[in-house]
Each structure stands twice: as structure tokens, then as C-alpha cells.
Image (tube, helix red, strand yellow):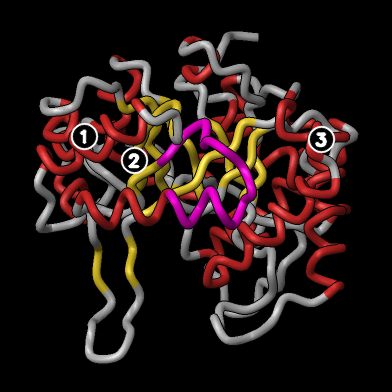
Amino acid sequence: MKAIPLQKHGINASQLVLGCMRMGGDWDKNSSITDEHYKEGQAAVETSLEIGINMFDHADIYTAGKAETVFGHVLKNNPKLREKMIIQSKCGIRFAEGNNPHLFDFSEGHILNSVDGILKRLGIEYLDILLLHRPDALVDPEEVASAIQKLKSTGKVNHFGVSNMNHGQIKLLQAYSGEPFIVNQLEMSLLKIGFIETGIHVNQEVAKNNIFPDGTLEYCRLENIQLQSWGPLARGLYSGASLDGQSESVIQTAKLVQKMAEEKGTTPEAIVLAWLMTHPAGIQPVIGTINPSRIRACKDAATLRLTREEWYTLYISSRGVDVP
């Protein structure tokens, strides 16, 4: 199987990533972490490692920091797990507090303070990868570069990337930073097919309705930037979630996914993820469940690849109309 971009950068990461957003309960910063939350986190990590997932995705805002605290508790109970893992987290989103609005912040001070908080909650000395979470309209690329240089020189972060950015935004940051940006995490799935539609709709009127940033997929491929997919299971719509109120294309695609899973002796989750992973860009799906049975249901995606005909059959079903 062809190496994914992270592996080309010397990072021995699995192609599946466990997203830890649901660890720690709700998003109320005043609520406490319970014993059940710790048990859920432990089970999710153990199950992930069991099926070959060695990469874990966090953000400083997930469940108001409790997700990282729960994960840190798992590592505290078994410190040797750290050397088996690739751990990434994100910063740059600030929630509303007091008179301050919900905003994005790539200032040097915020980035440095955020990383210190992340490392403290996780109970680790360094992050393998830090992602800048969402574009800050007031970004000063020189400030970002300064923060990156300090984090790298102090050994707090080994590698850097972004999330939810187009190629122009990445190029601006890269022009000032001596450290390469090696990840871009975007919403991509069998439901959110804009990353494919952008290319299919070149020179067509319908292209104006597509919000996926034109040229970003190609830029990341050219620059060996790892494309990561958040929401890759499409909220479970193709693997058992309620389809009440969904479009006919979603309903028919769910049936097609189920049929294909039965024919291949696997799970709907594996089919949905394999659709992404069959793409030659080497996409890394970040699965958002911490339910052990659903994590296990994703296992076959690591080795399953679809034929061109199968891939296009699912794509055309999702878009609801034939390709041009």
C-alpha cells in the first residue's frame, strides 16, 4: 500500500486516526469528569491500538479541555503508551467569555499559552503535531512563525499543520515559517463531497455553489501535505443512524453502502472510510466515535480499497445525479 504523506515525512502514523472530541463528557467547563468518562477514554484508546490506530487527534477546546485531561489520565496509568502514539492537538479558537466574543486567535501569546495548557492536560512533554484550528482573519504570519520557532526550539512541538484552510492561507503562513506545514484537516466524506466536486465541475456553472476551496486538494498533494478528514463517517448516516428527513440520495446511498458491505463481508463504516482512503491523495480519516464497537467496525478500512467502478458508484449515488 502506498505511503501516506505523514509517513513520507518520517512519521509512522496509521491511516486511521482516532478523534478524541467526545472524551470527557459535555462542553460545560464547569462540569466534572466522572469515573465513567475515564473508563470510556481508556476503552477507546485500548480499542484503537488493538485495531492498529496509533494516531490520536485533540484540540484544546474539546469538551472545554476535558478530552485532553481524560487522555492524559490514560497515559498516566500507562506511561509506556506514549511511545506507541502520534499525538496531535489544535489551538486558535477562543470561546465567548464575559464581554469577549467567540473568536479566532493566532497571536503568538495565545499559541504559546495554548500549547502549555495542552501539554499540561495531556501530561506529556511534547506534541508530535500542532494544528492551527481555524483561520484567524487578523493573522500576522510573522507572529505565527515566531511562535512556531519557539515551540520547535524548546522541544514542545515536533511538527506543524493547519485545519480548515485553503492553499492560499497555507502559502501565506509558509512564506514566513522555516518549519513546513505538513497537515491540513478539512471536512471530507461521502456526504461532504465538495473536494471531488471542485474538480468535476471545472468550467461549469454549477461550480459556483461549491464551497470547497478550489485548488487546495491539488496543492496539498503537490506539497506532500497530509489531508485529514474530519467528519469522515458523515454522522453515521450511511452506517445505521436515523434517516428521517434525509434526502433521497442519502437514503439510497445508505442502502448501497449496506449492500456493498454485505457483499464484501465487512461493515458499512469500513466501506464509507474506504471510499475516502481509496482516493490517491492518501486521506487520513479522523473518526469521531469513542464507542469501542464502532471503532472496531472501522478496522477493515485500513486494508480495504474499492475498484474505480465501486468508488464512482458511491460518488454518483451521493451526488444524486450522474457526472457531467
Q: Tag 3's secondary structure?
A: helix
Task: Find residue 314 and report its horizontal and vertical position in percent.
Answer: 58, 40
Residue in view at x 49 percent, y 42 percent: 229
Q: Tell whether position 285 is magenta.
A: no
Find out whether the residues at labels 2 and 1 contact each other: C-beta distance under 8 Å. Answer: yes
Nearest to the observer: residue 160 or residue 78: 78
- Which of the two discs, 2 and 3, labels the residue nearer the N terminus? 3
Looking at the rendered structure, the kind of residue marked 3 is Leu
Looking at the rendered structure, the kind of residue marked 1 is Ile
Within 10 Å of disc 2 (Cα), the crowding (few <14, some 14-19, many 20+) is many
Left or right of 234 in this view: 280 = left
Within 10 Å of disc 1 (Cα), the crowding (few <14, some 14-19, many 20+) is many
Looking at the rendered structure, the kind of residue marked 2 is Val
Residue in view at x 62 percent, y 51 percent: 122
Disc 1/disc 3 C-alpha distance (Å)? 32 Å
Q: Which region is colored magenta?
A: 116-130
Nearest to the observer: residue 4 or residue 306: 4
State the residue lying farthest toward the bottom: 98
Q: Which residue is mark 2?
A: 162
Q: Which mark is residue 170?
A: 1
Compared to 223, does 54 lie above or below? below
- Which of the two discs, 2 and 1, labels the residue nearer the N terminus? 2
Find out whether the residues at labels 1 and 3 contact each other: C-beta distance under 8 Å. Answer: no
Q: Which mark is residue 49?
A: 3
Q: Which mark is residue 122?
A: none
Within 10 Å of disc 3 (Cα), the crowding (few <14, some 14-19, many 20+) is some
Residue in view at x 69 percent, y 74 percent: 25
Nearest to the observer: residue 236 or residue 208: 236
Tell me which corner region of the image, top left, top right, bottom left or bottom right, holds residue 196: top left
Q: Tell whether position 123 is magenta.
A: yes
